[in-house]
Image: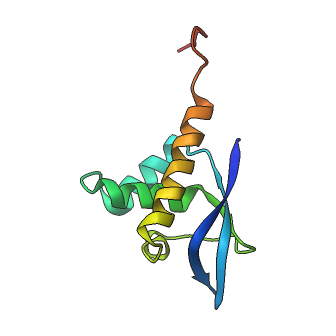
């Protein structure tokens, strides 16, 4: 499974330490289903945060579990950085142009 690492500007305080670096993996449909059960599908930003919490491999040395409540403490800019990482991971899983995908 693909992962991407990134760096935040303000970061997140975890166990008394400011953490700026993170690693995120591709989301599975189970991540989406589980996130929908937690927050519902009628709140798109909360749903993305719940999926993101499941995708996070680590922040600094902390390896989870992560919760949407933890991510709610991010600045908007840092959340956007992590959202961009989610989008990059989706793109990595898409077939190349002209490549046929079996269903």
Instruction: Please say if 8 is above or below 52.
Output: below
**In the figure, is residue 1 to the left or right of 93?**
right
* Viewer-side residue, 89 vs 57: 89
Residue 65, given in percent of the width and then of the height, sits at 60, 71
* Viewer-side residue, 87 vs 70: 87
Q: Which residue sits furthest right? A: 61
In the rendered view, how is the structure colored?
rainbow
Residue 51, given in percent of the width and then of the height, sits at 47, 55
Residue 70, given in percent of the width and then of the height, sits at 49, 76
When asked about the image quadrant of residue 9, the answer is: bottom right
Q: Which residue sits furthest bottom? A: 16
* Viewer-side residue, 10 vs 66: 10
* Viewer-side residue, 27 vs 83: 83
Q: Residue at x 51, y 49 (%)?
A: 84
Location of the N terminus (image quadrant) = top right
**In the figure, is residue 5 to the left or right of 65?**
right
Q: Residue at x 48, y 53 (%)?
A: 83
Instruction: Please say if 79 is above or below 31.
Output: below
**In the figure, is residue 44 to the left or right of 3?**
left
Residue 39, given in percent of the width and then of the height, sits at 33, 61
Instruction: Please say if 67 is above or below 51.
Output: below
């Amino acid at each position: 499974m693909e992962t991407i690492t990134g760096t935040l500007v303000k970061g997140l305080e975890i166990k008394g330490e400011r953490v700026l670096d993170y690693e995120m993996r591709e989301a599975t449909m189970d991540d989406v289903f589980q996130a929908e059960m937690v927050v519902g599908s009628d709140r798109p930003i909360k749903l993305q945060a719940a999926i993101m919490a499941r995708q996070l491999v680590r922040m600094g040395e902390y390896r989870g579990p992560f919760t949407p409540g933890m991510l709610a403490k991010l600045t908007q800019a840092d959340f956007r950085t992590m959202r961009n990482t989610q989008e990059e991971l989706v793109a990595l899983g898409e077939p190349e142009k002209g490549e046929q995908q079996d269903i």
